[in-house]
């Protein structure tokens, strides 16, 4: 296939072939974070809430909401977050038999669709934090994250753009 230079050609991925992870700030004042996890091939995603963002928090969240339910992926990709590049994190993924790949941070050419997913989640969390009815506890934030999960799964990964991106 002859493709002009600079043209992006989508690559079909199978389930658990490449899983992307990123740490998202939920409520900095409360010390709450989420681990964004998304399967590139299917759009399956999870947003477990974390009470910190150390490599141990990331490992626990990944095991609890991804590995235990879906199994081991071939490759886990991140954008070089400090908690994701720790030797302990790399060792954790190697023990699972998973390759760990790091891409340049915010490189939309390398992973635009996945960055749109994470940006949609960030936008949602920012809006919730700015509202007068801001969640006050971890259980309320879990409900917000589950709703954001469902919204992002349906909007961004299947359709390619969030409703706010389609409106602009």
Image (tube, rainbow, N blue to C red):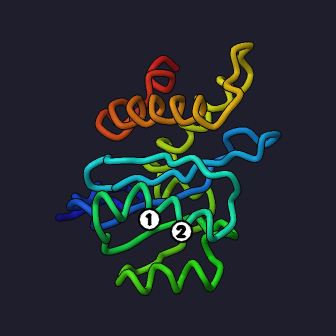
Residue 4 or residue 124, whichever sits in front: 124
Regarding mark 1 in the picture, which secondary structure is present there?
Answer: helix
- Examine the image and state in which quarter residue 147 appears: top left
Q: Which residue is mark 2?
A: 59
In the image, residue 66 above or below residue 159: below
Q: Residue at x 47, y 62 (%)?
A: 62
Q: Residue at x 42, y 55 (%)?
A: 65
Within 10 Å of disc 2 (Cα), the crowding (few <14, some 14-19, many 20+) is some
Residue 82 percent location from the top left of the image: 70, 70
Q: Is 35 in front, or is 154?
A: 35
* Residue lying furthest right: 29
User: How would you rate the neighbour count of disc 1 (Cα within 10 Å): few for under 14, some for 14-19, many for 20 or more?
Assistant: some
* 165 on left or right of 73: right
Q: Secondary structure at mark 2?
A: helix
* Callout 2 touching callout 1 (CB < 8 Å): yes
| Residue under the image location 47 percent in, 42 percent down | 117
- As displayed, is residue 31 above or below residue 97? above
Quarter of the picture containing the N terminus is: bottom left
Q: Which residue is mark 1?
A: 63
Q: Residue 134's x, y, as percent? A: 70, 21
Residue 73 in picture, x, y percent from top left: 32, 70
Quadrant of residue 70 within the rendered picture: bottom left
Cα–Cα gap, marks 2 and 1: 6 Å
Q: Is residue 117 left or right of residue 155?
A: right
Residue 119 appears at what percent x and percent y?
56, 40
User: Closest to the observer: 160 or 93?
Assistant: 93
């Amino acid at each position: 296939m002859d493709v002009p230079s600079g043209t992006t050609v989508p690559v079909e991925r199978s389930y658990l072939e490449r899983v992307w992870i990123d740490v998202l700030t939920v409520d900095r004042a409360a010390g709450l974070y989420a681990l964004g996890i998304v399967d590139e091939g299917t759009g399956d995603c999870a947003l477990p809430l974390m009470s910190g963002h150390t490599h141990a928090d990331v490992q626990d969240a990944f095991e609890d909401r991804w590995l235990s339910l879906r199994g081991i992926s071939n490759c886990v990709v991140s954008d070089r977050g400090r908690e994701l590049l720790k030797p302990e994190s790399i060792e954790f993924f190697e023990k699972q038999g998973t390759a760990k790949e790091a891409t340049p941070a915010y490189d939309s050419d390398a992973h635009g669709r996945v960055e749109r997913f994470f940006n949609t989640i960030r936008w949602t969390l920012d809006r919730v934090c700015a509202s007068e009815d801001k969640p006050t506890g971890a259980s309320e934030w879990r409900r917000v994250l589950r709703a954001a999960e469902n919204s992002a799964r349906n909007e961004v990964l299947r359709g390619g753009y969030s409703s706010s991106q389609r409106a602009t």
